Image (cartoon, rainbow, N blue to C red):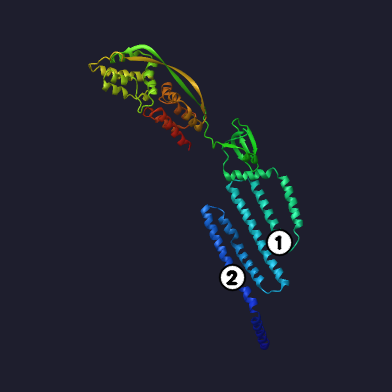
Amino acid sequence: MDGIENCTRRAAITWLGENWPDITIPLAVFLFALIATFWLRRLAYDYVDKWAQRVKWQGHKIFREATKTPSTLWALIISAALALAVSSAPSEWENPAGKGLWTLFFFSLTLCGLTLARRFISLYGDRFKAPHPATVLAWNVARIVIIVVAILILLDIWGAPTSPILLVVAVAALVAALAFRDSFPNLLAWFQLNASGQVKVGDYIKLGAGEEGYVAEISWRNTLIRALDESTVLIANSKLVQSTVINYGRPLKKAKEPFRFYTRMHLKELTGLRARNLRELADALKTVPDSVVYYHTHHFLEEHHYLAPEPANDFAPWVSDALGEEVLGERLASIDTFEFTSLEALRERLVSIMEEYLSQGSNLRDAAEGREFHFVKSVSVISPTPFVAHDLREFVEALRKISLGSLYFHIFESRLRLRKGLNDFSAWLENALEEKELADKIARLDPYTYTLEGLRSSLIQLIEKRIK
């Protein structure tokens, strides 16, 4: 037995001595290729991780998990195939071994591709809130394509004819194209709509053909639009993508009642009354109609809206300039016209200040000839404008376009008309839109510290801030 073992050992050593290049070279190639493929694998993962972090790609974890184990097998298979290619193995078993290795490689690659396709479709389906039928269809199409390509590659590796299979695939593809010739473009358009995010459920859109309304649903085939009259329009996604679309964005809350903008014009009418001194001014002011009080207070403000701060009334400058009573003029100018909710209350305040000054027994002078105070009556003509607002966006757009007369009517005159110390805008915002906070902010604005254009700008800024 010892002799036999010694003979076998000597024979093995002799064979290794004669054939060592045939063993060491393939082994060296295998080890070198294995090290190189693992190094390249690590570089690839590092690059993908950095790239995913830079672009915030959510799929890099799925990619790493799905390819971590198969990539190790791929490295071993590629290294073994390269070692086999440089070996001196007999051709009668080298070719089957090589084909077997590449078969194993593509079989593993196919399984990995199926896993990646399934998980990526699930990831992006959830991200884009895709309906379940669309997700299932995408997965089935991806699975069929991957399996067919893998079968064709494996048949080619083993030298089997692929023409019959290619013919079957072509016929199946033609049948599928005919069967889904309408659905497939709509599915692609659905992916485009979701990826771009330009049209979303809840948006108000208007198509070039005239259809308009709120986007109620976006399915994988059609988009449902609900018009303002509650009728519905079903539009194919492919048609929607190809159309000119105006997207007004997500509509704001609709008011219970629309706000209609009005304006008014004032006609001046001389009353024939005039005052030469403070006593005549106070006595006349007690009896003149409210339209006279209005003209010399509110209408005066509108005529001098370009001044900041705006003068309070006609009486203050006349008393200061024509009568020389600057102290009294300053007291009259300090009256906050905006705090009075009725012309009668404003009249009483003016008269009380004049009577108090007269009671002091000051030596009051008469105005010079030609500088008497002439009482003028205001005749108002109210008319509607074409501007109507149903929500805050329409309201702020109308504010940009209305005349200063319309703005004055709704801010200043409304306080006298409503007799609540509230302007038309605040009343509508609170009652029709339930925007109490915004209504209070507008009500707290002191319009006498702005020009009318400045007041318009402040109103627009407040409302735009609320819309955003």
**Numbered tag placed on residue 32 in the rendering:** 2
Sequence-wise, which precedes: disc 2 or disc 1? 2
Locate the N terminus and report the quarter of the image it occupies: bottom right
Residue at position x 57%, y 59% from top? 64
* Residue 312, quarter of picture: top left
Q: Residues within 10 Å of mark 1 (few under 14, many from 20)?
A: many
Q: Is residue 299 left or right of residue 174?
A: left
Residue at position x 65%, y 72% from top? 86
Q: Nearer the viewer, residue 212 or 361?
A: 212
Q: Position of residue 50 (x, y in %)?
A: 52, 57
**Numbered tag placed on residue 154 in the rendering:** 1
Residue at position x 64%, y 69% from top? 82
Q: Is residue 155 left or right of residue 240?
A: right
Q: Is residue 442 above or below residue 160?
A: above
Q: Position of residue 313 (x, y in %)?
A: 34, 21
Is disc 2 in contact with disc 1, using a CB cutoff of under 8 Å? no
